[in-house]
Amino acid sequence: MTIILDGKKTAQKIISKISEEVFKLDVKPKLGVILAGDNPASLIYVNNKLKIAKEIGIEVDFKHFTQNLTNNEIIKKILEWNKDDSVNAILVQLPLPGILYAPSIIEKIDSKKDADGFTPYNIGQLILGYKPYAEPCTPKGIIRLLKEYNIEIEGKIAVVLGRSNIVGKPLSALLRQNNAAVINLHSKTSEKNILAFSKQADILVAAIGQPNYVTSEFVKDDAVVIDVGINRVNNKIIGDVDFKSVVDKASYITPVPGGVGPMTIAMLMENTLELYKNQHKKINPL
Ligand code: GUN
């Protein structure tokens, strides 16, 4: 029988533990959040992050820039927060409007305050298999969800569809670090090869932003299927996996919504608290 991986319940459990820890702290952790422009999906994601943070006692400083701005305006805010000891974690919501250049902005975040684990130092550590100050939230949340359900990663064939900097690349690194054999496919892989490799997967992750792309023919019997897609179609949220077609074939599957999404937010809260603790203990993992 297929088991539905309940990201909502798992995230709530993690968030409630973090909340208990935060409650005991005299000085609360603070998360600085930057949003540029009015991308409707980003507005919803950021509001969800701010809402959960506030609910569990994490302070937030939210800076919402308009669409028409320069790299320097955002960088100025980042440098200000880097210097401010009361700000423990910094997040710049992606994607940024086209006129901005994300790498020049992200690299300015102090890696010790990098809530997303996106700076070159933190990503470098991750790829090398060393400890970053924080790991990217969605990949970290997926690994945590697999572990919460005691799903073996070591020795498995993991196929990751999508090579984004936010999910596909860091997730491939984390799966490799957990001793999976990782195959990372992308938009320039032929459909024929995507199908052929996906069918070999013990763990199949879809992070390509194409609604209902993965159907049962892509899925090996008893595979673990992780759906990272959040696609808005006719005002409904649809994943990258055609759930109905795949559910009976998989051993485990994440739903959309209620799978990976809530885990991303839980990991952001965890990263914020970990960065706070690191800064307060003056620990340097190097
Ligand atoms: N956009 C989509 N997912 C994410 C994320 O995890 N962090 C940031 N900063 N932007 C995102």
Image (cartoon, rainbow, N blue to C red):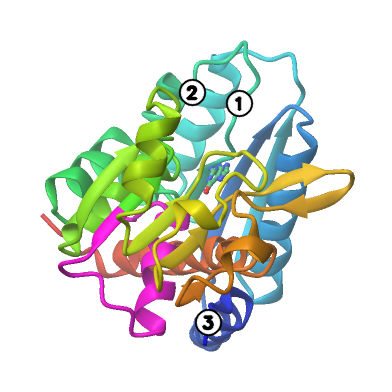
Q: Nearer the viewer, residue 198 or 78?
A: 198
Q: Is residue 9 shown in magenta?
A: no
Q: Which residue is mark 1?
A: 96
Residue extent of the magenta highlight = 133-158
Q: Position of residue 286 (x, y in %)?
A: 10, 54
Helix, strand or loop at mark 2: helix
Q: CA distance from mark 3 to mark 2?
A: 40 Å
Q: Amino acid at mark 3?
A: Thr
**N-terminal of the two: label 1 or label 3?**
3
Q: Residue at x 41, y 19 (%)?
A: 104
Q: Nearer the viewer, residue 240 or 132?
A: 240
Magenta span contains residue 139: yes
* Left or right: 127 in relation to 136: left
Q: Position of residue 78 (x, y in %)?
A: 50, 34
Q: Is residue 212 above or below residue 21?
A: above
Q: Residue at x 32, y 45 (%)?
A: 197
Mark 3 or mark 2, whichever is nearer to me: 3
Report if the CB atoms under discs 1 and 2 are less than 8 Å apart.
yes
Residue on which disc 3 sits: 2
Q: Is residue 205 above or below residue 71?
A: below
Q: Which element type, helix, strand or loop, lies under badge 3?
A: loop
Q: Residue at the location (79% across, 30% down)?
A: 38
- Mark found first going from the N terminus, 1 or 2: 1
Is residue 171 visible to us here? Answer: no
The residue where tag 2 is placed is 102
Where residue 218 appears, as percent x and y from the top left, is: 46, 51
In the displayed structure, does residue 138 sit left or right of residue 122? right
